[in-house]
C-alpha cells in the first residue's frame, strides 16, 4: 500500500481481494466518487417548483496503471470471476459499491514502461458501509457467529436488535436461527411500531431463515447454517404482514418473537447507505 493516499481495492464473488493502491497496480485519477441528486422542476411564472428529487446513480471511473502485462492479466482474471465490489477508503472508513467493471487494454508506454488502461464501473447499488446489528441473548454475552464484520452492535434486551442506521433508508437482511416456531419481527423507531413480518413455519436446529429485503437479492428462504439452500419459504409468509421492508433513516430497532418457547436467535445485516 502506498502511504499517504486514499485506498482502493476490489472484492469478487470468491471473496478474493485485489489491492488497487500499489506500484504494480494503481487506480489512477479516479472520478465520480461524489454524491448528488437528480432534480425535476416545473416552471411556474417566474419561479420554479421542485417536483421530484432522487440520488444520482454512482458512476465512478479512472485508469488502472500496471507495470507488466502479467499484472494486467492477473487483474483481468480477478474481474472475470464476477460479483464485484469496489471498495474506497478516503480516510478511516471503507465504503462499498456493487459494480460491473469494464477495462480497456493499452500497450506498454515507451516513456515509463507502464500500461495505462481506462476503466469504468456500472453501479448496481448505492455506496454503503458494511454494518451488522447483532442480537443479545438472555443468558448474557451474546452468541458468536462465524462471520466477521467491521461493526458489531449488541442489544441489552434479549430478542431486540438495535440498529444505528445512517441518514438514508436502508434494506435489511435478517437471519433467524433455528430452532424457532413461526418467527415474527417488528420494526420500531422512537417507540412506534412501523412494520411487522411473520413466516408460518418451524425452522429446525442447524437451519436458518434468511429474509433479504434488497430488491436485487430479495428472498425469504431456508438454509443450513453452513449456507446450503434448503427451500424457498416465501409462500409460507403471513401475507397480512409487510415481511420485506426498508429501515428508516436514523436509529431504529427490530424485535423478534416466536410462538415457541425461548429467545429468538437472530441478527440483522444492514448496508448503511452513504
Image (spheres, rainbow, N blue to C red):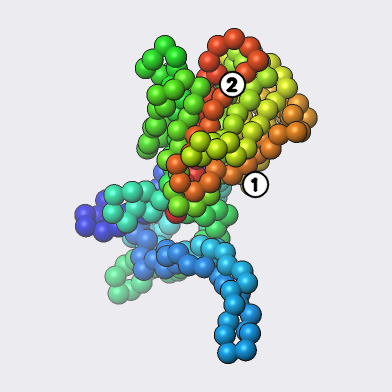
- Percent across and percent down for residue 17 are 41, 44
| Label 2 Cα neighbours within 10 Å, binned few <14 / some 14-19 / many ≥20 | many
Q: Does residue 121 appear in this view?
A: yes
Residue indicated by mark 2:
257
Residue placed at 51% from the left, 39% from the top?
189
- Indicate the position of residue 128 as horizontal and vertical percent values: 46, 50
Instruction: Give residue 209's quadrant in the image.
Output: top right
SS for callout 2: strand
In terms of image quadrants, where is residue 115?
Answer: bottom left
In the structure shown, which secondary structural element does the residue marked by tag 1 occupy? loop
Give the residue at x 60% y 13%.
Answer: 179
Does residue 74 lie above or below 229 as drawn? below
Please provide percent x and percent y for residue 125.
Answer: 55, 53
Is residue 232 rendered to the left or right of residue 143?
Answer: right
Circles 1 and 2 in contact, beta carbons < 8 Å: no
- In the picture of the structure, the residue carrying the numbered disc 1 is 215
In the displayed structure image, the side of residue 142 where residue 249 appears, left or right: right
Q: Residue furthest front?
A: 191
The answer to whether residue 128 of the structure is visible from this angle is no
Amino acid at each position: 500500500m502506498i502511504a499517504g493516499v486514499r485506498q482502493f481495492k476490489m472484492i469478487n464473488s470468491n471473496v478474493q481481494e485485489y489491492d488497487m493502491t500499489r506500484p504494480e497496480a494503481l487506480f489512477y485519477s479516479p472520478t465520480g466518487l461524489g454524491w448528488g441528486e437528480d432534480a425535476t422542476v416545473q416552471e411556474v411564472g417566474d419561479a420554479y417548483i421542485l417536483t421530484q428529487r432522487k440520488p444520482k446513480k454512482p458512476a465512478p471511473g479512472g485508469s488502472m496503471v500496471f507495470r507488466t502485462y502479467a499484472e494486467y492479466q492477473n487483474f483481468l482474471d480477478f474481474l472475470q470471476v464476477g460479483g464485484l465490489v469496489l471498495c474506497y477508503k478516503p480516510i478511516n472508513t471503507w465504503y462499498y459499491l456493487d459494480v460491473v467493471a469494464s477495462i480497456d487494454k493499452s500497450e506498454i508506454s515507451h516513456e515509463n514502461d507502464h500500461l495505462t488502461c481506462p476503466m469504468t464501473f456500472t453501479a448496481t447499488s448505492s455506496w454503503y458501509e458494511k454494518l451488522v446489528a447483532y442480537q443479545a441473548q438472555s443468558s448474557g454475552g451474546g452468541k458468536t457467529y462465524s462471520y466477521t464484520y467491521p461493526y458489531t452492535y449488541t442489544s441489552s434486551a434479549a430478542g431486540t436488535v438495535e440498529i444505528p442506521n445512517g441518514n438514508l433508508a436502508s434494506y435489511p437482511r435478517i437471519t433467524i436461527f433455528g430452532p424457532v416456531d413461526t418467527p415474527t419481527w417488528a420494526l420500531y423507531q422512537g417507540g412506534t411500531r412501523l412494520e411487522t413480518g411473520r413466516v408460518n413455519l418451524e425452522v429446525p436446529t442447524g437451519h436458518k431463515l434468511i429474509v433479504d429485503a434488497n430488491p436485487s437479492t430479495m428472498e425469504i428462504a431456508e438454509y443450513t447454517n453452513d449456507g446450503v439452500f434448503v427451500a424457498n419459504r416465501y409462500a409460507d409468509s403471513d401475507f397480512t404482514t409487510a415481511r420485506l421492508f426498508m429501515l428508516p433513516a436514523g436509529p431504529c430497532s427490530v424485535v423478534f418473537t416466536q410462538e415457541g418457547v425461548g429467545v429468538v436467535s437472530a441478527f440483522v445485516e444492514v448496508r448503511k447507505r452513504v
